[in-house]
Amino acid sequence: MFAVFATGGKQYRVEQGDVIFVEKLEGEVGAECKFDALLVKKDDGTVAVGAPTVEGASVTAKIAGQVKGRKIVVYKYKAKKNERKKQGHRQPYTKLEITAING
């Protein structure tokens, strides 16, 4: 059994027990999240494809942590002008543990 759902402008294919990183969601560690925008759901050989979403289906996940991605360095400069700017960025993510695929 698997499902494809959308959050944060991206689509994720998940099964029960998977651990994924999604764009930051508000919530405390241990809180439960529910995603109703299922695009595809496959269960025991039957495939339900939404138009645009599958009615009555959802994915339930538990927030396992609020983490940051690896650091990237942004360096801007203008040649021959002695202008330099170095900047770092770490994207925040939410670590989710998929607990159930409902519906």
Image: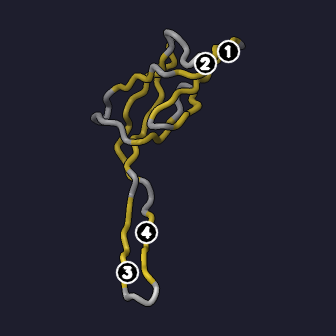
Three-letter amino acid code of the residue under disc 3: Arg
Q: Position of residue 45 (x, y in %)?
A: 72, 13
In the rendered structure, which disc, 4 or 2, sits on the residue that comes first in sequence? Answer: 2
- Considering depth in this image, is 37 or 31 the residue closer to the camera? 37
Q: Name the mark on residue 74.
A: 4
User: Which residue is under mark 1?
Assistant: 47
103 w.r.t. 79: above or below: above
How far across and how far down the image is residue 55, in percent?
Answer: 52, 10
The answer to the question of whether label 2 and label 1 lie on touching residues, with beta carbons closer than 8 A, is yes
Give the residue at x 44% y 23%: 35
Quadrant of residue 65 within the rendered picture:
top left
Q: What element carries label 4?
A: strand
The amino acid type of the residue labelled 2 equals Lys
Up-down relation of residue 8 to residue 71 (above or below):
above
Say left or right for 73 vs 47.
Answer: left
Pointer 2 residue: 41
The answer to which of 95 and 83 lies nearer the viewer is: 83
Give the SS element for disc 1.
strand
Q: Which colour scheme is used?
A: secondary structure
- What whole-number distance in Å separates the C-alpha atoms at marks 4 and 1? 44 Å
Mark 3 surroundings: few (<14), some (14-19) or many (≥20) residues within 10 A:
few
Quarter that holds the N terminus:
top right
Q: What residue type is labelled 4?
A: Val
Mark 2 or mark 3, which is nearer the start of the sequence? Answer: 2
- The residue at the far right in this view is 45
Amino acid on which disc 1 is placed: Val
Whether residues under marks 3 and 2 lie with C-beta atoms below 8 angstroms apart, the answer is no
Front position among marks 1 and 3: 3
Which tag, 1 or 3, sits closer to the chain's start?
1
Label 2 to label 1, Cα distance in Å? Answer: 6 Å
**Residue under pointer 3:** 84
Which mark lies nearer to you, 4 or 2? 4
